[in-house]
Amino acid sequence: MKKSFTFFFLAFFFIPLAAQQERKIVILHTNDIHSRVTGYAPEASYTPLTVNDDNTVGGFARIATVIKEEKDKNKDINLVLDAGDFLMGTLFQALETTTGFQLGLMNDMGYDVVCLGNHEFDYGPEKLSEIVSSAKKRGEIPATLLSNAQFDKNDPGDNSLEQLFSDGTIKRKFILEKGGLKFGFFSLMGVEADDNAAFAPPVTFSKQIPAAKKLVKELRDEKCDLIICLSHSGVKKDKNGKWKGEDFNLAKKVKGIDVIISGHSHTELEEPLIVNGIPVVQAGVNGQYVGKLSLTYNNGIVTVDGYSLIPVNDRIEGDPGINQMVEDQKKEITKKILSPLGLDYEKTVTETDFLLECVELGDIKGSNLGPMVADAIHKYVNNHVKPGTDISMVAVGVIRDKFVPGLQSAPDVFRVMSMGNGNDNVPGYPLARAFLTGKELKKALEVLQIAYKSTPGNYCYYSGLRVEFDPKKGLLRKISKITIIHPDGTSANVDFSKNNKTLYSIAASSYMLENVSIIKKMSFGLINVVLKDAMGNPITVMKDAIIDFDESREGLQEGKEWLALMEYLSSMKDSNGNGIPDIDKRYKEAIQSFFTVKK
């Protein structure tokens, strides 16, 4: 009788204890939001506080509502995470170094942990440190991670960012206790993301797999129940439709990770990739979705209960408090950035009744947007600078958005060409100009015409140029004729013989011209093109190639791609008589610069 009572007592005690160990965990996650703080597109249609009256997607007010509602549904453990590139892509980035607005806003929305991606480095490590420091001065920020960053002891250019790691503002790892469980977090910058982080140096990034193994061990030694990696690396399909990518390999090669929240590749995963038992998830791009991963934790075992991508659209009523903060920041953007340029956040610039887009992993040769941007740069430089330029160009990789039919305002135009910063207070890479001989121009065009096959972002669109080529011929023998088309409609053929010392000018963003080294890389060092100034001297510092758009004023007056696009669109005719310029119908179809000929 006594034994029976003892068994009953032990069973009564231990069954509830086991039940207590089973926890329901919901992970809400985003990646590659790119400062899409407001819904789009066009932005003028965005009505976050009313539902079912617009076709826009995204917006932080709506994301905040999704987070709140999902937390209300799960009364156990909730985590809200972001896998990097939360910054850069809209006018909101323009004030980040002084206001740190977005990180604080994400904290107010309920984010627990975020990691840094390549676009957080778009302004360089010193400016990134200013952004994070400004955000912290305003108030609480989510735990901010980057585990495999390495600093240069001999270069002071990363000192302020290194200090934020030293004082714990940015962390290499983070432990969060919720509901009696210890969650260990670390983050990685992938190889491709590292390649895209042109302004990260002198910061570099160590190899992912060794870094991950080291951090998993450290977090396990600290008795973490679950380990979550925020990896700005990505997954994608190969030509046979099978999944591959850096995060796929990470899950394959590193034991001990329980979940990988992926970013960088802008992939919409409708269900988790389960690799060696590790769920890998990613939620697309620009805040169109919030990913929801449901887990059960029981006695050290993690199982996936479900997964979905929650659409962020006009069926969701945005959070009024978050929306008010956004509206206040929009006023600051107008006051400090747009008004000095004679612009306004809300004012309509142009309208279109057809889609203009440039899809990096789509039909890039069939893009109607790329040639229009190149034309805008060409007209802007030739209208404002004497002498102007022979050729203008833009690459797929720097075209960041599209024009959806409707009314377009300044933020819509900026989103299309939103990358970078110059030496003034106006966001965007400055326009620059360099010179090549006819022979060098031919070499450059030959290489650029094949460079995109490995990296689609390298595909270029041109204005002021017509090229005849035979794609079946070998490298440096494809192009048979190059014609410069002048703004007045006249044209002249380029003599690309060795004896021709005439210099031809090329206008593009400083970022594009600075990366002309791709020509040497793509040709395995066999072809080297040296950018020159108007006198034929090699350009050693890209700052020297930046165009001064008003020499009558003191200092360097920079021009920007997005301002060129603004001016070009504003100059177009009002075809429907409503007082708003309409995007020219000739851009309804792709305009080509390269024409196939056979000889």
Image (cartoon, rainbow, N blue to C red):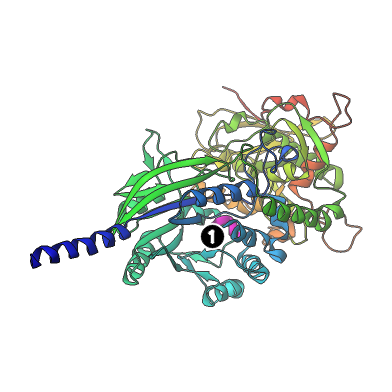
> Residue 228: x and y, percent?
40, 58
Q: Is residue 218 magenta?
A: no
Name the one closer to the observer, 143 or 526. 143
Report if residue 495 is visible in the image.
no
Give the main secondary structure, helix, strand or loop, of the magenta stretch: helix
At 24% from the left and 59% from the top, the residue drawn is 15
Decide: is 344 above or below 216.
above
Decide: is 224 above or below 575.
below
State how many labels appear: 1
> Residue 521: x and y, percent?
51, 50
**Mark 1, secondary structure of its residue:** loop
Q: Quick one: which residue is furthest to the front in this view?
A: 1
Instruction: Using the rendered view, name the quadrant where residue 185 is placed.
Output: bottom left
Q: Is residue 119 magenta?
A: yes
At 75% from the left and 52% from the top, the residue drawn is 327
Q: Is residue 506 left or right of residue 224?
A: right
> Residue 204: x and y, percent?
50, 65
Decide: is 330 above or below 155.
above
Considering the image in quadrants, where does the C terminus appear?
top right
**Residue that label 1 marks:** 116
Instruction: Using the rendered view, name the quadrant where residue 250 is placed.
Output: bottom left
> Residue 586: x and y, percent?
75, 25
Report if residue 591 is visible in the image.
yes
Extent of the magenta region = 116-121
Name the one closer to the observer, 558 or 411. 411
Callout 1 crowding tier (Cα within 10 Å): few <14, some 14–19, many ≥20? many
User: Which amino acid, mark 1?
Assistant: Leu
At 68% from the left and 29% from the top, the residue drawn is 355
